[in-house]
Structures are given as C-alpha cells and as structure tokens.
Amino acid sequence: MRSPSCLVLLFALLALLSCARAEEAALICDTCLSLMDNALNDLLSIIEKVGVSGSCEKVCELLPNQYEMEACFVICEYFGITEFQKILGELNPSPVSICMALTACPFNPALGGHFSSVVVSPTKGPQGATFNIEATYILNATSGTANTVLEISPPAGSPLGESKIIIGQAAGPAKIAASVQTMPQQGQTFPPGVYQVIVAVCEGQCGGTHHNEYTVAQGKSSFTITE
C-alpha cells in the first residue's frame, strides 16, 4: 500500500500532467522517456502476464525499482490502463513515439525546417587529426519532441555519431556540433579515405516508422583522412 506522502506526490504529478507549463512539461516528458528507455521490455512482459484485466497498480508494482514503479503509476493512472496497454503494444519499441502518443511528450504534426549549412573543418587531414563539424538548421515552428542526429560513415567499418532528444525546440536557427578525434582506437581504426557526414533533425525518433515520427530536414558533408 502506498504511503500518504507518496500519494500526495503522485496527485501533484497528475495535476502537472493536466496543466503543465514548459518546464514542467519537459520534466514530464523526460520522466516518461526514462521509464520507457529503462523499463519498456519489463512492462510489456508484465502486461502480457497480468492481461487486460489488470490495474495500473498491479502492473506497475511488479517493476524492479521504486522510481520506475512511481513513474509508471502516474502515467498509467492518468491515461488509463486500457489506453496505456494499447499504446505500449502498438508503438513498441520506440520510447519517443510511445510518450508522444500518451501526450506525456509534445508532438508537432507539421514541423518544417532546413539545414542552412553543414561545415567540416578541416576538410582533409592525416590520421589522428581532429575534424570539427558544425551544422546549422532552421525550424519554422516550435518542435514537439525533436531528435537531432549526427552520423559519420567511414570508408570501412561501423558508423559513429551521436543522437540527442530536444523537447520544445524553439523556432529559428539551432546548431549541431561535434569534434571527431581520428586517432585509431579499439573499435574504430579510422582508415584513410572519405568519411560521409549526415545530419538530421526529426520529429520523434529519426529513422522511426510510426505515424508520429518523421524527418524534418537532412544535410550532409564529408571529410578525408589522407594516407
């Protein structure tokens, strides 16, 4: 049984879900994303065992730690166990898509934008050199839950890069920046050749296939590691 202080916290969080300012909305979204990133497989397994007749408490109390239990209970109670189960099943395995469908994370169905520049400096250098990448993109409106991706494809071997979730990215210009140090190391040898640089901004998860995930803009450049 939940303690009185715990229940007070839960009801306060439920109030935030129904009437959230920008900072509070971002916190709610972060909480949902963290829950789905860490506990989605556990939740799906629990729901399969408990079945549709289960309650939010019966489902959430079976998660392995207290934080996940409380976050699950708040989100599940707000949307109802039936809708919660339905969305998790339909949108697995995309935490971003699930949280947008639950309206725990914002969604803009018509976000537009473009990359105004993708610059790599230097464009050519020896193995071991550091290449600085800076891409500028411009959004025509405030994003819902955006995802920025920078991916580097070597002439041989696995791609490398980074991905970032941005909640409520304001309209106007923004940057994606990274420095790539090409000293050979375990897992990445940085052989000579041309390295393709691809940058993207998406609503929802880049590369996602659900109805609330799409690419807003994409840009590209390259650099060369010499012999």
Image (spheres, rainbow, N blue to C red):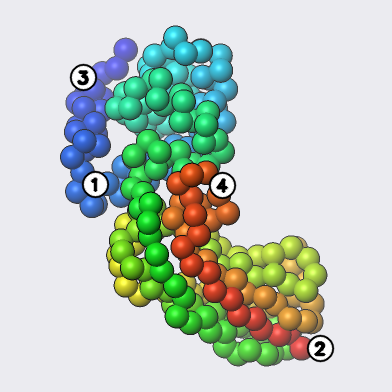
How many numbered discs? 4
Q: Nearer the viewer, mark 3 or mark 4?
A: 4
Q: Earlier in the sequence, mark 1 or mark 3?
A: 3
Cα gap from disc 4 to disc 2, whole angstroms: 40 Å
Q: Is residue 81 above or below residue 90?
A: above
Cα gap from disc 1 to disc 3, whole angstroms: 23 Å
Cα gap from disc 1 to disc 4, whole angstroms: 28 Å
> What type is the residue that disc 4 sits on?
Thr
- Per the image, label 4 sits on a secondary structure element best described as loop
Residue position marked by numbered label 2 in the rendering: 227
> What type is the residue that disc 2 sits on?
Glu
Q: Earlier in the sequence, mark 2 or mark 3?
A: 3
- Per the image, label 3 sits on a secondary structure element best described as helix
- Per the image, label 2 sits on a secondary structure element best described as loop
Residue position marked by numbered label 3 in the rendering: 4
Contact check, label 2 and label 3, Cβ < 8 Å: no
Residue position marked by numbered label 1 in the rendering: 24
Residue drawn 33% across and 68% down? 140
Residue 160 in picture, x, y percent from top left: 65, 65
Residue 109 disc label: none
> What type is the residue that disc 1 sits on?
Glu
Q: Earlier in the sequence, mark 3 or mark 4?
A: 3
Q: Nearer the viewer, mark 4 or mark 2?
A: 4
Around disc 3, counting alpha carbons within 10 Å, would you say few (fewer than 14), some (14 to 19), or many (20 or more)? Answer: few
